[in-house]
Image: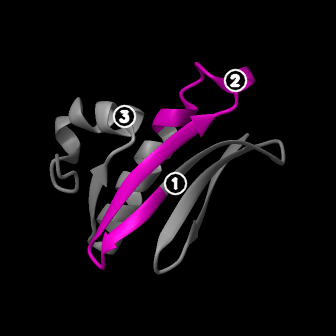
Amino acid sequence: MVEIEQKNNLNFGEFFIVKQGKNVGKMQYEWSNPLTFNIVHTEVDPEFEGQGFGKKLVNAAVDFARKEGKTIKATCSYAHSVLSKDDSVEDVFTK
């Protein structure tokens, strides 16, 4: 089973993918201002690549933004690519 965990503070935060008690991926973000966070890095352990974990992390950020009324920027090339291709995130993603 895969779980997504989040750590967040006033300056930055992270989402983690946890599989069988092991962190196998993470996505880091920084707060640009109180209403916008910028995804700066997404990483999945090589042995777990190709299983959709990176996209799950990006989707967790979208869910968080919607729940909290925030917007997302992405300087991480992976996150930017995923978000740019998904018209359903236009409510939270700022290109």
Amino acid type, residue under disc 3 in the picture: Ser
Task: Kindly identify which residue carries mark 3.
Answer: 77
Which residue is found at the position 42% from the left and 64% from the top?
30
Residue 26 x/y as whole percent: 60, 46
Which residue is located at x 15 percent, y 48 percent? Answer: 90
Distance from Cα at disc 2 to Cα at disc 1 = 18 Å
Residue drawn 49% across and 45% down? Answer: 41
Please determine whether, in this image, residue 35 is positioned above or below residue 79: below
Residue 90 drawn above or below residue 45: below
Query: Toward the viewer: 61 or 63?
Result: 61
Mark 1 sits on what residue? 28
| Residue under the image location 16 percent in, 37 percent down | 87
Q: Earlier in the sequence, mark 3 or mark 2?
A: 2
Q: Quadrant of residue 86?
A: top left
Residue 25 horizontal/vertical position (percent): 65, 41
3D distance between C-alphas at marks 1 and 3: 13 Å
Task: Please state, as top left, top right, bottom left or bottom right, where the N terminus lies in the image.
Answer: top right
Extent of the magenta region: 29-55
Task: Answer left or right for 14 relative to 90.
Answer: right
Cα distance between the residues tagged 3 and 2: 18 Å
Of badges 3 and 2, the one in the foreground is: 3
Residue 41 is a magenta residue: yes
Residue furthest out toward the right: 21
Dot placed on the residue nearer the N-terminal end, 1 or 3: 1
Secondary structure state at the residue bearing disc 3: helix
Asked if the residue under mark 2 is in contact with the one under mark 3, i.e. CB atoms within 8 Å, the reply is no
Secondary structure type for disc 1: strand
**70 relative position to 39: left or right:** left
Q: Residues within 10 Å of mark 1 (few under 14, many from 20)?
A: many
Q: Which mark is residue 46?
A: 2
